[in-house]
Amino acid sequence: MEERLQGNPVSEGIAYAKSYIYIPGTLTKAPDFFPKGQEEEKYREFRESCEKADSELVTLYNGMCKEDPDKAKIFSAHRELLQDEEILDEIRETICEENMNPDSAVSKVYTEFAELLAGVEDPLIAERAADLRDVRDRLLRILSGQETSKLSSFSEDVILVAHDLLPSDTATMDRKHIKGILTEVGGVNSHSAILARSYGIPAILGVPNVTEKIPTDTMLAMDGLTGEIFVTPGEECICDIREKQTSFFRKKEAEKNFLNKPAIMKDGTEIKIGINIGSQEFDVPTDRYDFIGLFRTEFLYMEGKELPGEETQFEAYRQVVQKAKGHPITLRTLDIGGDKTLPYMELPKEDNPFLGKRAIRLCFAEKELFLTQLRAALRASAYGPLQIMFPMVGSLEDIRKAKEYLNLAKEQLKERKQQFDEQIRIGIMIEIPAIALIADLAAEEVDFASIGSNDLTQYLSAADRMNPEVAAYYRSDSTAMLRLLRFVFQEFSKRGKEISVCGEMAGNPETAQLLVGLGARKLSMSSGNIAGVKAKLAECTLQELTALAEKKL
Amino acid sequence: MTKKQVEIVNKTGLHARPASDFVLEAKKYESKITICRENGVPVNAKSVVRILAEGIGQGTKIEIAAEGTDEEQAAASLAALVESGFGE
């Protein structure tokens, strides 16, 4: 019988394959006991499983260290838990004094500690419960005599069905045969979702009780675009899904054709496409984009153990200028403070970090830090078209103050007789509603502006975009937001000042259409979105998009 | 037994890396070491899980208690580590 389930689509794509229900080493049997006298032998069995687990973790850590140091850290944290004194003591007691079998004892003690952590109010600690479960499952697998994770090799294509996926499951996952992922928990930003997208595997998360509803080896069809799952689909449904699959692949292929071409609409209107980058280590061929709309500079400050010096910064900025081969680059000055902190700088704890002393506000307070960055950026402008953008600007005073700092930095360089672009263009991020509402006045003060649609939406709708409880209130396509955007585009365009968008709205094909309809001609996005946006824009005329936007105002 | 009262000054509290650093330092001593929140129950300072489970944030006052041959040194060095803000 065909049955339909629905979940939250987080990674696009279509799959049709057998189900594989993944239940990690968790014990389903009731705890069992061994006869007295075997304590020593049973305890040794447990200690050996710990040693084996530790050596597996070392291997995983070393293997991951170069590719993804952040992910590698997870495994050193697991080693720490594996050697935790209290956990070891409790397991020893459970085995040696209660005579519980090692697997049952591991399961019991680790589960108890995981529940203890899961109950802590601080979400950062509660999340670590997943690490304890991960270590537990590793030990249980080893105790059951299995060599490798069940997910590391399949002999045929499967759709993986699990409660949740843990970091160590996914690190060694068989990417060739796993065609799709379904889980019971997790949202767009969960570990499983990020991983599925980076592997290009379709995924639907948040499907209630899916591991109980679907037995292993059941044929499944899943649509990672809509979130639909068809259990034992009938002939008609299979045909349908095959068709969708073909058209999805065709669409992906077709999009690739747009990648290296300018974004031209049906009526000939060209939209300039920019990329957002987060360091000088970007690798996007220069024929795919027209400008670098957002060069985030935070990486320089997050990596080291102290504030980056002028030379380090200058070197990084110069490399970007040279790599961009003549494409204009918008360098955004330090956007830190609030939720993003620096390990070596004591910043006051704030109740509302997003409304606090962040970005330009912090730079105004830390003069030397700000001037150092401005000097480095100015010096890089001698090598190509670099422009400077100030984040979190909320008033004309902010703009004027920032310009004063820039002039001071220029003076300092002149004294040192160092080269820079005297006519360097300066601009602002539009992310605070207060500046958006005076776009007419702001446009007179600057050469350009870029709309940070994520923060602007968040501030306008008073909804934290990281808080899933208020996700429904965070709407970038609300009438209020669209009216505000149109006003900003109009006021800047009227004055012949450059205006672009660098938030997530620009990289999503649907909202990109809307932005163009409202007046945007420059969109900057992460490089993975270029093909999709270019392809979508090529489908329509400017007139159609204007009409589309009008309807929503 | 040697006891020291300290306040957590670093921003992240006794979480993540600070918790690991604290346990690592505690393990250098032979003494039995516990930490205790105000009106709380003492927990083993050599167990990262126990410390995490206490959910000790910035501004929390804790008592470090050590008992054993190197108790004075242990309590002093752990108190100093907390007061240094774990280099944050």
Image (spheres, coloured by chain):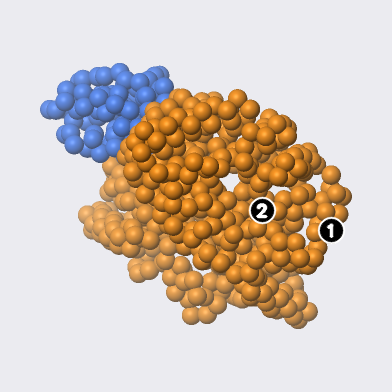
Chain colours: A orange, B blue
x then y, percent, for residue A551? 87, 50
Which quadrant of the figure has residue A203? bottom right
Q: Quadrant of residue A431?
A: top right
Q: Residues within 10 Å of mark 1 (few under 14, many from 20)?
A: few
Q: Is residue A238 above or below residue B15?
A: below
> Which residue is at a point 36% across and 38% down the rendered structure image?
A417
Q: Position of residue B30 (x, y in %)?
A: 16, 34
User: According to the image, label 2 marks what residue?
Assistant: A522
The number of callouts visible is 2
Q: Circle 1 marks a residue in which chain?
A: A
Q: Which mark is residue A543?
A: 1
Q: Position of residue A392 (x, y in %)?
A: 58, 34
**Left of A59 or right of it: where is A489?**
right
- What distance separates the C-alpha of mark 1 from that of mark 2? 17 Å
Q: Does the CB distance between marks 1 and 2 fall below 8 Å?
A: no
Residue under the image location 60 percent in, 70 percent down: A260
